[in-house]
Image: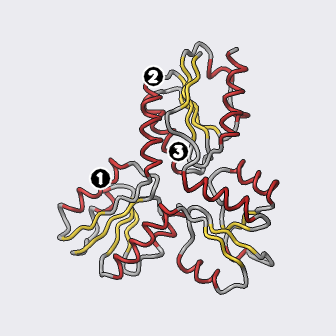
Amino acid sequence: MIIELAKNYGFCFGVKRAIKKAEQIKDAATIGPLIHNNEEILRLQKDFNVKTLENINALNDEKKAIIRTHGITKQDLADLKKRNIEIFDATCPFVTKPQQICERMSDEGYEVVIFGDENHPEVKGVKSYVSTKAYVVLSKKELENIKLPNKIAVVSQTTKKPEHFMEIVNFLILRVKEVRVFNTICDATFKNQDAIKELSVKSDVVIVVGGKNSANTKQLFLIAKMHCEDSYLIETEEELKKEWFLNKKHCGISAGASTPDWIINKVIAKIKTFVD
């Protein structure tokens, strides 16, 4: 059986930056999970004493706080700055960008449509920078019964599919007098999604490695599943099952943006024990 990695997969720029920061800072607390990968978070805790707090209210006597890659709300950041604690901002620059756009556009009187999951920490943070009115939607249907204003700005969660973003943009352009469109989808997301599509078409089994609470990882899995029925989402090699690989000729492997190489390597090694 051929085992082939996607052309683009794994750690993105923002995650690499955040992990490096956490390793250098040490003995700190992150506000929310630094990234969406439990195994890597456990490694940081064990090797660098970087612990994870649910929110800023969980801070006690910590001296150093790291803001997660997905960012935090504007209000939480303001509250954090009032505390006697050293702050290290590991918010991904691709997430900071829509925050800044939302703040600027709403200051100019635009209401804002955010294409994304309202419960995702990145979206919660971005929405908090809107001072007018924000509409968080996952499809154009959610906008159909809303009385829209004359001026609207549109941004996206960084991990969403561009074709779905364009459906919302096209819907708004036909109904709103002035629409300002900002493509805030991350380049790494484009590349990883294109790569898993290309790989899954020629594979008869696909393994996607990453946190099951990771939006970009789940998106990779959904794309793989569309083109290869025998696609599986796992967090570690322990979840692999030998029967998945019986009579398979080509195994494709991809990984979410928060998945480190050491986990991917363990997965590959385990698969090889099934087929050797």
Q: Nearer the viewer, mark 2 or mark 3?
A: 2
| Rendered-image quadrant of the N terminus | top right
**Residue depicted at x 42% and y 45%:** 190
Residue at image coords 53%, 61%: 120
For the residue carrying disc 2, how many other residues have a C-alpha within 10 Å: few (<14), some (14-19), or many (20+)?
some
Snapshot quadrant of residue 53: bottom right
Residues at badges 3 and 1 in contact (C-beta under 8 Å)? Answer: no
Q: Amino acid at mark 2?
A: Lys
Earlier in the chain: of badge 3 and badge 1, it is 1
At label 3, the amino acid type is Lys
Q: Residue furthest front?
A: 24
Quadrant containing the C terminus is top right
Name the colour scheme: secondary structure
| Residue bearing mark 1 | 166
Determine which residue is flagged by label 2: 202
Q: Secondary structure at mark 3?
A: helix
| Marks 2 and 1 in Cβ contact (< 8 Å) | no
- Which labelled disc corresponds to residue 248? none
Tag of residue 218: 3
The kind of secondary structure element at disc 2 is helix
Question: How far across and how far down the image is residue 130, in percent?
Answer: 41, 76
In screen coordinates, is 101 left or right of 67?
Answer: left
Name the residue type under label 1: Met
Relative vertical location of residue 199 with respect to residue 88 in this rendering, above or below: above
Marks 2 and 3 close (CB-CB < 8 Å) = no
